[in-house]
Amino acid sequence: MSKTILVTGAGSGFGEAAAIGIAKNGHHVIATAQIAPQVAALRKKASDLGLPNLRVEKLDLFDPYDVAYAQRWDIDVLWSNAGIGESGPASEIPVDLVRRNYEVNVFKPLELSQGFIRKWVAAGKKAKIVFTSSMGGLFTPAGFGVYVSTKHALEAIAESLQQELAPFGIKIQTINPGAYLTGYNETMADTAFRWLDDAKNFTKRDALRATLDGMLSQPEGHLDPQEMIDRMIAIVPADTGKFRNVCPQFVEDMLKKSQVEAWNRQI
């Protein structure tokens, strides 16, 4: 059956590509982007592709009028995909940047979700929320601790929501992409160098750059994003499936191994 699906963070990357793919499969998609230029660009793509069922709207989660307007829409699936990432050592990163990362990745998605949940429960509507988490929601690499901590928090909220909302017929899923080459991780790695100062910080710029470049240069960090896009197109509208969806399989295996090893880690 065709569903109406709201996608946040559809102005680029996975969100944009999967929103287009979901619409091509016949669903009604409300693809939202934070800023007007992204809205205009995606509307043109939808027109050029002949996808009248791909509706594009502005949704800045920090704009209460945008959020109130969005929560008037009648949808079957909320795909909470918008997010940002801050890199840098947790021991020195300015705390205002940590707060901002949590606002975008945790608090605002939860706030948006709660609005739809209240509507669905009141109406007795069966629906679904999908959160874009990350492989980083299940382990912690040095240099990305703040960002992945937001995804750890999102994992906990999603698990709680799944248990709380099951009696109401509201389903919850997470999607946990591996290190696909979309440019997101590379751009996030640069964020620390806005504030990191060799004259003030004990973490030195060259040392952090070497650490981050070492991780990002691994073949496992250069995966073709089309694999994940195809999985998202299938997962988001589906009525059944796994709660947690890690892709690709070797990343799921690595995460499980890492979690077992954590029990024996020494200080």
Image: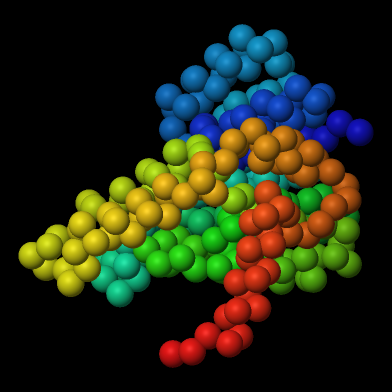
Q: Residue at x 18, y 72 (%)?
A: 202
Q: Nearer the viewer, residue 100 or 15?
A: 15
Q: Position of residue 21 (x, y in %)?
A: 71, 27
Quadrant of the snapshot with the C terminus: bottom left
| Figure quadrant of residue 71 | top right
Q: Residue at x 11, y 68 (%)?
A: 200
Quadrant of the snapshot with the N terminus: top right
* Residue 64 shown left or right of residue 91 in the figure: right
* Residue 238 shown left or right of residue 174 in the figure: right
Instruction: State the residue lying farthest toward the left.
Output: 199
Question: From the viewer's perspective, is residue 20 above or below residue 210?
Answer: above
Q: Nearer the viewer, residue 200 or 16?
A: 200
Q: Residue at x 45, y 38 (%)?
A: 183
| Figure quadrant of residue 176 | bottom right
Q: Position of residue 265 (x, y in %)?
A: 53, 85
Residue 267 appears in the figure: yes
Q: Position of residue 89 (x, y in %)?
A: 32, 67
* Residue 142 shown left or right of residue 236 in the figure: left
Q: Position of residue 51 (x, y in %)?
A: 71, 16
Q: Nearer the viewer, residue 239 or 112?
A: 239
